[in-house]
Every structure is written in structure tokens, then in C-alpha cells.
Image (cartoon, rainbow, N blue to C red):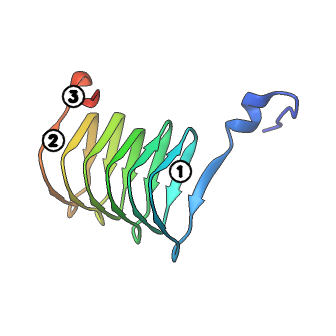
Amino acid sequence: MIRNKNNPEAIVGGLHNTLAIGTKVKGDIILDIDFRLDGCIEGNIKCGAKIVVGPKAQVNGNIESVNAEIAGTLAGTIRASEKLIVKSTADITGDIFTKILEIEPNAKVNGSCNMSADAVKK
């Protein structure tokens, strides 16, 4: 795909943030583009796009995003306004709020789940 340098949408559409394995953050993270987490976060994450929590990642806090894919450990509430995918390696302790939920076999989820458009909104 050829991108036009003069078109800001073409440039932003390919950007994402990554927090690598071995990185630990204490505090909240707020971003508007895709985010891949492979490290550890002690705090809340508010993502205006998609968040991917890798299999070795740990989050001790709440996640709010449009779409989410959880493969690691989450201790907190997750609100995905569109779709949440819980991978087989995931371990979630907390409540889930989303429109669409996909859970793979062997995933661990301990909490309540509410699947409605109204439930996702605070």
C-alpha cells in the first residue's frame, strides 16, 4: 500500500504504541491509537482504538477501549465498546462490559459479564 505523506489520516492509520516485555509502568495511560502491551501496568488504560494485552502482559487496573484482545493477566474491569476477544492464555479477574464477546477454550474469567450497548457506557 502506498501512503501519501501529505495525508495525515494515511500516516496515523498505521501507527500504534507498544510497551515491551520487561517494561513496568505505574500510572494511567491514555491514548487514541492502537496499543500493544507485553509488559506490566499498574494503573488504568483508556484507549480510543484497539488494545492487545499479550500473553506475558499484566494489568492491575481498568481497561477502557473500542476493541480489545486479552491474552495475559488482567485484574480490573474491562469496557470494550465494540468487541472483546479473550484468548486461551488469558486470566481475567474483574467485570466485563462489551457488545460482542469471544472467549477461547481454557481462558480464565472470574467476574460478571454484561453484553449490551448501554452497559458499556459509564
Residue 59 pos. (x, y %): 36, 62
Compare marks 1 and 3 and give the one earlier in the sequence: 1
Residue 50 pos. (x, y %): 48, 42
Residue drawn at point x = 58 percent, y = 41 percent: 33
Residue drawn at point x = 39 percent, y = 67 percent: 55
Vertical placement of 76 versus 24: above or below? above
| Residue for badge 2 | 113
Label 1 Cα crowd, 10 Å radius (few <14 / some 14-19 / many 20+): many
Give the alpha-carbon distance from disc 1 to disc 2, as whole Å: 23 Å
Residue, far front:
27
| Residue for badge 3 | 119
Give the alpha-carbon distance from disc 2 to disc 3, as whole Å: 10 Å
Vertical placement of 48 versus 95: above or below? above
Mark whose residue sits in front, 2 or 3: 3
Label of residue 35 in the image:
1
Residue drawn at point x = 27 percent, y = 30 percent: 120
Residue, far top:
118
Compare marks 2 and 3 and give the one earlier in the sequence: 2
Residue, far bottom:
22
Q: In the rendered structure, which amino acid carries the disc numbered 3?
A: Ala
